[in-house]
Amino acid sequence: MYGLCDCNNFYASCERVFRPDLVGRPVVVLSNNDGCIIARSNEAKALGIGMGQPFYQVRPLIERGQVTVFSANFALYGDLSRRVMATLRSLVPGIEVYSIDEAFFDLRGMTEPLDELGRTIGRTIRRNVGIPVSIGIAPTKTLAKIASKLAKQYPRLNGCCYMHRPEDIAKVLGRFPLQEVWGIGRRYGRMFDRMGLRTAQQFVDLPQEWVRARMGVAGLRTWSELQGVECISFEQLPPRKQQITISRTFPREITTREELERIVAEFASMCAEKLRGEGSVCSEVQSYLLTNRHREDQPQRYETSLQLLSEPTDSTLEIVRQARIALRQVFLPGYGYKKAGVILSQITPASERQGSLFSPVDIQKQSRLMQVLDTVNKTHGKGTLVVAAQGTEPFRMNREHLSPRYTTDWKELLVVKPR
Amino acid sequence: MAQKNNPTLTFHAPDLSSRQEIPVAGGEVKAGFPSPADDFLDSPLDLNRELVHNPAATFFVRVSGDSMAGDGIDDGDLLIVDRSVTPYDGCIAVCYVDGEFTVKRVRLEKGCAWLMPSNPRYRPIRVDAGNEFLIWGIVRHVIKTFK
């Protein structure tokens, strides 16, 4: 049996850990730069606030419904996510962290009653970390996902849905919307919609050959998993990242190359730091620029440029240099840019790095320099030591509704007044 | 109730990644004779292990104010708060009462609870079903810094 532990409305729930007054009240969380809605409490969903909707569109609803608004506080969410995962790990034989707010867990060898175990997991995470979760337990990961959605939907399940008898599974699939099945996605969802297939059971009833022909191996896996045949393996170690990206939408349009170069240099530094954190090196650096899509009266551009490196690197200096070269290739004056990003790709483990015989850089020396950079920024705070190309003024996001970083910064104190 | 010098709490998470270890025995010998203590080395003492029993459930809370001075909890002290401990009668806890956080000793009675300060300038607070009340976490340790 597999389990899925899914945090309910995770970002909104994180804010509520330190704001118990908001329990039972509508809460929304905005994306970086306060652009769109990225999380809603159940009460906010009930008001009709949509996922991904631009903030300005729902402003009237928010004012009328007395919704509490937060800017995304990923320092807090990341810390509470680690705590949720650590608590789960202490209760089951193995876990696979799937996203910031979801983890699969392995129940092989655990004794019944598994639904009781599921509820204990839920209660423990709720008490120890303060985050409400929904638990689904079923013979495959795909079915466990469905079970966790049922656990969220039906309060009488007490936060855990254990779905194992074939007749129960059949009953659930007969009613479960096909579009919501893990692995179906939007593209196939639309296809099935046109075909008139609505439930997971209708998909299961399709012939195997048809599924293979139309959806390939991935589709076949979903099809089999829905029938209780385990096809998606359990991965305890997170796969090495394929890409590392930092991108931001600007609060205002940026027109000058100098300013964009500074921003891109900063994003490249952040990417390089992440890369070293994973013990990886990359051999492609890409920069891109995007104009404001919402301004149809203005000329539009999306341009990207890729730099191939002569040898893999994890050096901030080299990555920043390449990102700026790429930027200069895509920048054209006369446009107002609203978004920029840096992407590192062709990522491999640093331990397998193939040095070039005629390398112009001393890898040992550079790696010592990077160690100093990382140590200084870790002990004295992010952005203490930066490359000059970033300038002295760090890129600031619009975060008007930011809550304190209660758990990761000594200076950001939750001030509470006892009576 | 004393309103001056209101106690204030601030929250932090422990970072266990850095370890300050204090070796209990033994030393490195560069050359010459091996240390006779080598066979008796214990692992170093780790304050994180001693004070943080359940890292995922442990939060740091800063005290400001003197309402718990009688229990040795003073202005500026750091509380180590464990949410995984089940509240018990007489525990010292970070509580949430009617919109505010406070640290108090909790007396559990039938149908109500008393939040007991340990400074005569403050009065006990009675909470029952009519209050918005939550025991947020149990205080396990207090860290004081002498300057």
Image (spheres, helix red, strand yellow):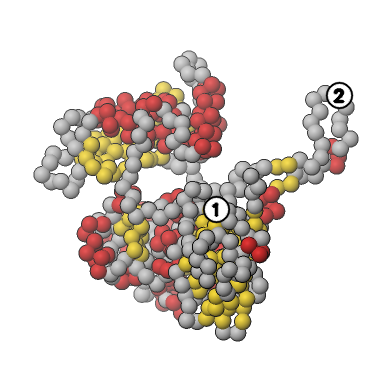
Quadrant of the snapshot with the N terminus of chain A: bottom right
The amino acid marked with disc number 2 is Gly
Q: Which residue is drawn at 57% across and 74% down?
A: B124
Label annotation for residue A354:
none
Q: Which residue is at the far left?
A: A297
Above or below for A42 versus B33:
below
Residue placed most toward the observer, A333 or A106: A333
A58 shown above or below B131 = above
The residue pinned by badge 1 equals B13
Nearest to the observer: residue A95 or residue B102: B102
**Looking at numbered disc 1 in the image, what kind of residue is underneath it?**
Ala
| Camera sees residue B79 | yes
Q: In this view, does A325 lie above or below B25?
A: above
Q: How crowded is mark 1: few (under 14 residues within 10 Å), some or many (20 or more)?
A: many
Residue A91 location, x and y as percent? Answer: 61, 63
In what element is the residue under mark 1? loop
Q: Where is residue A409 in the image (x, y as percent from the top left)?
A: 49, 48
Q: In which quarter of the image is residue B84?
A: bottom right
The residue depicted at 46 percent of the width and 79 percent of the height is A156
What residue is disc 2 on? B32
- Chain name for mark 2: B
Indicate the chain on which mark 1 is placed.
B
Q: Is residue B20 above or below residue B112?
A: above
In the image, taking residue A155 as reference, residue A259 lies left or right, namely left
Tags 2 and 1 both on a single chain: yes
Q: Is residue A177 something one can see in this rendering?
A: no
